[in-house]
Image (cartoon, rainbow, N blue to C red):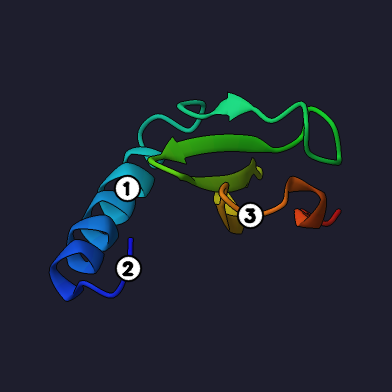
Amino acid sequence: MGRNPDSADRLAAEVFERVDLLAHHPELGAVALDADPKGRVRRLVIGPFRVFYRLKEDRIEIVRFWDARQDPRMLSIGK
């Protein structure tokens, strides 16, 4: 993305727009089978970024915002 403020603003707007959709469509993201704990985390793809989240009883918990251009071995979601 570089250091372009306009680009950063557009990315932020897209991220917030897509994450807001989760309030009405919590299963929008695919189950992240490559993240531990297996099958308990979902992934929303936004360009080269991934928003990892869990569905809790009455809320959505975002657990990681990940730039997928990084080494995937460094990805840690947590329990």
Q: Which mark is residue 75?
A: none
In the image, what residue type sits under mark 1? Asp
Say if 76 sits above or below 26 in the image.
Answer: below
Question: Left or right: where does residue 27 sit relative to residue 55?
Answer: left
Tell me the mark number nearer the camera, choosing from 3 and 1: 3
**Residue in view at x 61 percent, y 46 percent:** 53
Q: Position of residue 25 (x, y in %)?
A: 40, 29
Q: Residues within 10 Å of mark 2 (few under 14, many from 20)?
A: few
Q: Position of residue 19 (x, y in %)?
A: 38, 47
Q: Residues within 10 Å of mark 3 (few under 14, many from 20)?
A: few
Q: Position of residue 46 (x, y in %)?
A: 39, 41
- For label 2, the SS is loop
**Residues at marks 3 and 1 touching, judged by CB atoms closer than 8 Å:** no
Q: Read off the residue under disc 3.
A: 70
- For label 1, the SS is helix
Question: Left or right: where does residue 28 sit relative to residue 72?
Answer: left
**Residues at marks 2 and 3 touching, judged by CB atoms closer than 8 Å:** no
Which quadrant of the figure contains the N terminus?
bottom left
Q: Read off the residue under disc 2.
A: 2
**Residue in view at x 28 percent, y 75 percent:** 3
Q: Read off the residue under disc 1.
A: 20
**Residue in view at x 51 percent, y 29 percent:** 29
In the image, what residue type sits under mark 2? Gly
**Which residue is at the front of the view, 43 or 55?**
43
Say if 75 sits above or below 21 in the image.
Answer: below
- For label 3, the SS is loop
In the image, what residue type sits under mark 3? Gln
Q: Earlier in the sequence, mark 2 or mark 3?
A: 2
